[in-house]
Image (spheres, rainbow, N blue to C red):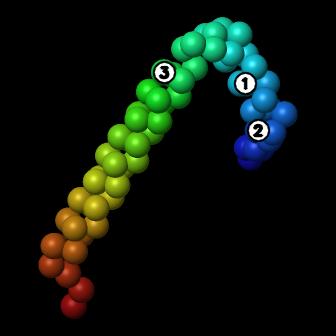
Amino acid sequence: MFSSIGVPGLILILIIALIVFGPSKLPEIGKAFGSSLKEFKNATKDIVDDDTSTKSDQPSTKQ
């Protein structure tokens, strides 16, 4: 369904980002992207943990 970007695609994206934002802004953008990704991972992990704990807390209805 989806194909991977690959090395040439990543290089093209980095070159475009360098042209658009400039070399002084790229570290700030990378840091912001990394912290956002970390926060997203933590939030999804919390949601999954809450979901599994809720399912295990419910009594079984099998007879």
In the orientation shown, which residue stands out farthest toward the front?
24
Q: Circle 1 is placed at which residue position?
A: 13
* Labels 1 & 3 near each other (Cβ < 8 A): no
Q: Is residue 54 left or right of residue 22?
A: left
* Labels 1 & 2 near each other (Cβ < 8 A): yes
Q: Is residue 43 left or right of residue 23?
A: left
In the orientation shown, which residue stands out farthest toward the right?
8
- Closer to the observer: label 1 or label 3? 3
* Vertical comparison of 8 with 41: above or below: above
Mark 2 → mark 3, Cα distance in angstroms: 24 Å
For badge 1, the amino acid type reads: Ile
Secondary structure under tag 2 reads loop
State the image coordinates of residue 8 (x, y, percent, origin top left).
84, 34
Quadrant of the image for the C terminus? bottom left
Mark 1 → mark 3, Cα distance in angstroms: 17 Å
Q: Which numbered circle lies on residue 46?
A: none
**Residue placed at 54% from the left, 24% from the top?**
27
**Residue placed at 76% from the left, 44% from the top?**
4
Q: Circle 2 is placed at which residue position?
A: 5
Q: Which numbered circle lies on residue 28?
A: 3
**Residue placed at 75% from the left, 19% from the top?**
15
Secondary structure under tag 3 reads helix
In the rendered image, which quarter is residue 12 located in? top right
In front: 19, or 60? Answer: 19
For badge 3, the amino acid type reads: Glu
